[in-house]
Amino acid sequence: MATSKDAAKRRNAPLATPTDLGSNATKDITAGLNLLLADVFALYMKTKNFHWHVSGPHFRDYHLLLDEQADQIFAMTDPIAERVRKLGGITLRSIGQVSKLQRILDNDAEYVEPLDMLSELRDDNKALVASMRSCHDVCEEHGDVATTSLIEVWIDETERRLWFLFETSRRGVTGGV
């Protein structure tokens, strides 16, 4: 029968996941991935916020676009967090940690024009791509092929979201945002 002393010992046991990457690599890569994870959660929430609050003549198209994009963004969260753990790191544990680390700004405005929503999300996705490239460089520097491969797919997906947001928010054939 387990005692409270046994339970306390298990609670305090380190999460020492084995990896062939050195401790500096683990520290650098997991720190970058946790920043990325915080940004992904922030972008997911902002995309859902705009999805829930979009209005106007293009409501259906924008509503569906933002829902599809939010699903794709959320789908990155578990692989990022699990990659941190596979490398022996500790990942985010709370919304509080997300808010401390996120670089994607929230938008709590009562009302945002639909084209402003799309433009803001376009800029946020562009910033996310830049962060992904930076994290990719760190992973590449440490020889973490698996994480670089994942990030390459996420960069492609994010560039696609960016492209769709750009094209959807254009104000005419010759004009642009």
Image: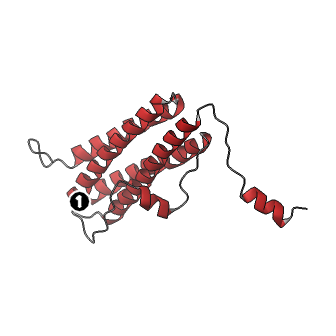
Examine the image and state in which quarter residue 104 appears. Answer: bottom left
Does residue 31 appear left or right of residue 171 in this picture? right
The number of discs equals 1
Name the residue at 67% across, 37% down: 18
Picture colour scheme:
secondary structure
Q: Position of residue 118 (x, y in %)?
A: 25, 53
Q: Residue furthest left?
A: 174
Can residue 58 be seen in this snapshot? no
Can residue 68 be seen in this snapshot? yes
For numbered disc 1, what is the local secondary structure? helix
Name the residue at 43% across, 60% down: 100
Examine the image and state in which quarter residue 133 appears. Answer: top left
Q: Relative to the observer, which residue lies in front, 54 or 103?
A: 103
Q: Badge 1: how crowded within 10 Å, few (<14), some, or many (20+)?
A: many
Examine the image and state in which quarter residue 53 appears. Answer: bottom left
Q: Position of residue 37 (x, y in %)?
A: 46, 50
Name the residue at 36% across, 56% down: 47
Task: Name the amino acid, label 1.
Answer: Pro
Q: Which residue lies furthest to the bottom in this view?
A: 110
As displayed, is residue 36 above or below residue 21?
A: below
Quadrant into which the N terminus falls: bottom right
Q: Which residue lies furthest to the front in this view?
A: 24
Q: Position of residue 86 (x, y in %)?
A: 61, 40
Q: Relative to the observer, which residue lies in front, 98 or 72?
A: 98
Q: Which residue lies furthest to the right in this view?
A: 1
Does residue 174 appear left or right of residue 91 in this picture? left
As displayed, is residue 34 above or below residue 138?
A: below
Q: Position of residue 145 (x, y in %)?
A: 51, 28
In the rendered image, which residue does mark 1 sit on? 114
Name the residue at 54% across, 47% down: 81
